[in-house]
């Protein structure tokens, strides 16, 4: 457990000292959301209608773009290999990295989302649902994404391949996330959608680190 | 006789070479019979007219799209668990065939949709999940392409195939859920009246033809892959000697 915490602390420290990455994900999120009113037109009613979907798609892309950092740097300088020698199961190392990824990407996106929702004129009934779906759903993005990041570790310029592998797997998260907000906006019960989203994340917590660890071990062979 | 009896590539190649022409011939005969029945014998539907004949290609392709992915996932699991040397090869060989069937199902579905629903594409739950399945195939094939070492590529692709296999039902469920939320039951009710026997038989024959074609193509692709590997090994041996 101490080793587990130490990895998280180290990665967080690295993220803070190197900076930039979180900031870039946020700026990307903001920019993508800004593009939509420019593309669709500024009518508040239309923007309010598409706001949940736009926010979730943009958050999903922002989370995906930052995935290649998950293991890449540690893989290149050899520290990933050193970590696997620590005696800690690889799946736990992977889980520690996933937690850091969520803390440095998912959490900032979650905090920025309400501000952007205001910009998109989203109905105020949807705000609680937006925060809840982001809170429940973004960990799943980091978890599922870790598999893609681990599989493309040895691939040169794996970014495009990563998106091809990961985006289809993100679809259920997107669907349940958006439908929960939609339900709340229309005054319906958002709970079933939220529960399904939570079920997805709960299932991903044990399964994804396991699969990602198998892929990490492969690239270290 | 265990599963590993055919782990020997030479033994497998011999058997495959014997089965392949039979499977191919069976596919050709069944396809001819099935197409004759479907295009000539079966009467035009009283509602859909002649467009109903698209079904005889569309439905078997959609079945094969699912079947090939299941085959791919099972072969990947066998490859990962028992390290069966031919399983990775079978999985690799089945992916482009499955992607082909999926593409065929999408195209014929679109051609059928135009006269029936008045649009080339509707975001119907079934269409959407088949489209996502197509992307899963593409990702799988791209991963094979991207990793040079074929041993590693095989294992990585197998992990991806299994992750995909776990996800296929979830994606299917979520897309159904999404569809019922966004557009309630409309024109797209394909499961209307039960299918009449005059239509069922040609459909089943076409489905069998597609299966036989899959076997023939799979064996051909696996033999090709084995021969390519042999050529590579021979070239390497030549260069080092």
Image (tube, rainbow, N blue to C red):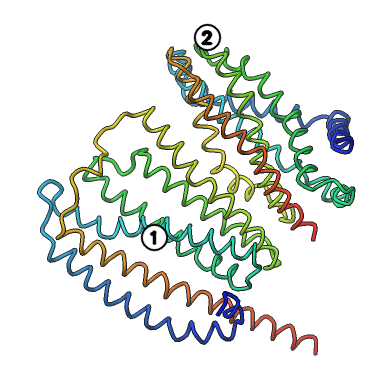
Asked if residue A85 lies left or right of residue A115, the reply is right
Snapshot quadrant of residue A63: top right
SS at badge 1: helix
> Which quarter shows the N terminus of chain B?
bottom right
Q: Which residue is mark 2?
A: A124
Residue farthest to the top, as pictured: A124
Percent position of residue B90, x then y = 54, 69
Mark 1 closeness class: few <14, some 14–19, many ≥20 residues within 10 Å:
many
| Chain bearing mark 2 | A
Percent position of residue A6, x then y = 89, 35
- Is disc 1 in the same subunit as disc 2? no
**Which residue is rendered at x = 21% and y = 64% of the image?**
B202
Q: Is residue A63 above or below residue B215?
A: above
The disc at residue B64 is 1
**Which residue is rendered at x = 79% and y = 37% of the image?**
A96
| Chain bearing mark 1 | B
């Amino acid at each position: 457990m101490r080793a587990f915490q130490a990895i998280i602390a180290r990665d967080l420290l690295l993220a803070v000292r190197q900076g930039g990455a979180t900031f870039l994900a946020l700026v990307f999120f903001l920019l993508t959301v800004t593009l939509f009113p420019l593309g669709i037109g500024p009518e508040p009613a239309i923007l309010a209608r598409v706001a949940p979907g736009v926010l979730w798609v943009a958050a999903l892309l922002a989370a995906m773009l930052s995935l290649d950092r998950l293991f890449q740097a540690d893989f290149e300088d050899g520290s990933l290999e050193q970590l696997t020698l620590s005696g800690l199961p690889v799946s736990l190392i992977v889980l520690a990295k996933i937690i850091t990824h969520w803390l440095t990407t998912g959490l900032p996106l979650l905090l920025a989302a309400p501000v952007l929702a205001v910009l998109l004129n989203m109905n105020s009934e949807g705000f609680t649902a937006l925060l809840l779906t982001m809170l429940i759903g973004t960990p799943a993005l980091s978890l599922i994404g870790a598999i893609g990041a681990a599989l493309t570790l040895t691939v040169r310029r794996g970014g495009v391949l990563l998106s091809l592998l990961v985006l289809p797997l993100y679809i259920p998260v997107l669907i349940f996330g958006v439908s929960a907000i939609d339900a709340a906006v229309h005054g319906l019960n958002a709970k079933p959608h939220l529960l399904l989203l939570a079920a997805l994340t709960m299932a991903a917590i044990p399964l994804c680190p396991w699969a990602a660890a198998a892929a990490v071990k492969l690239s270290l062979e | 006789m265990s599963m590993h009896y055919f782990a020997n590539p030479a033994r497998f190649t011999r058997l495959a070479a014997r089965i392949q022409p039979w499977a191919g011939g069976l596919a050709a005969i069944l396809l001819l019979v099935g197409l004759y029945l479907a295009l000539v014998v079966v009467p035009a539907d009283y509602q859909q007219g002649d467009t109903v004949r698209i079904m005889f290609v569309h439905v078997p392709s959609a079945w094969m799209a699912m079947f090939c992915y299941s085959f791919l996932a099972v072969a990947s699991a066998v490859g990962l668990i028992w390290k069966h040397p031919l399983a990775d090869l079978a999985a690799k060989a089945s992916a482009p065939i499955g992607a082909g069937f999926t593409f065929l199902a999408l195209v014929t579905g679109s051609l059928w949709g135009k006269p029936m629903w008045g649009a080339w594409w509707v975001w119907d739950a079934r269409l959407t999940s088949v489209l996502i399945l197509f992307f899963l195939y593409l990702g799988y094939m791209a991963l094979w392409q991207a990793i040079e070492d074929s041993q590693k590529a095989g294992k990585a692709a197998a992990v991806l195939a299994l992750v995909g296999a776990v996800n296929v039902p979830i994606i299917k469920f979520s897309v159904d859920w999404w569809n019922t939320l966004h557009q309630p039951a409309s024109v797209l009710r394909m499961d209307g009246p039960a299918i009449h026997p005059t239509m069922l038989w040609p459909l089943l024959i076409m489905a069998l033809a597609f299966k036989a074609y899959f076997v023939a193509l799979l064996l051909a692709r696996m033999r090709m892959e084995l021969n390519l590997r042999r050529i590579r090994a021979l070239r390497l041996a030549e260069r080092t000697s």
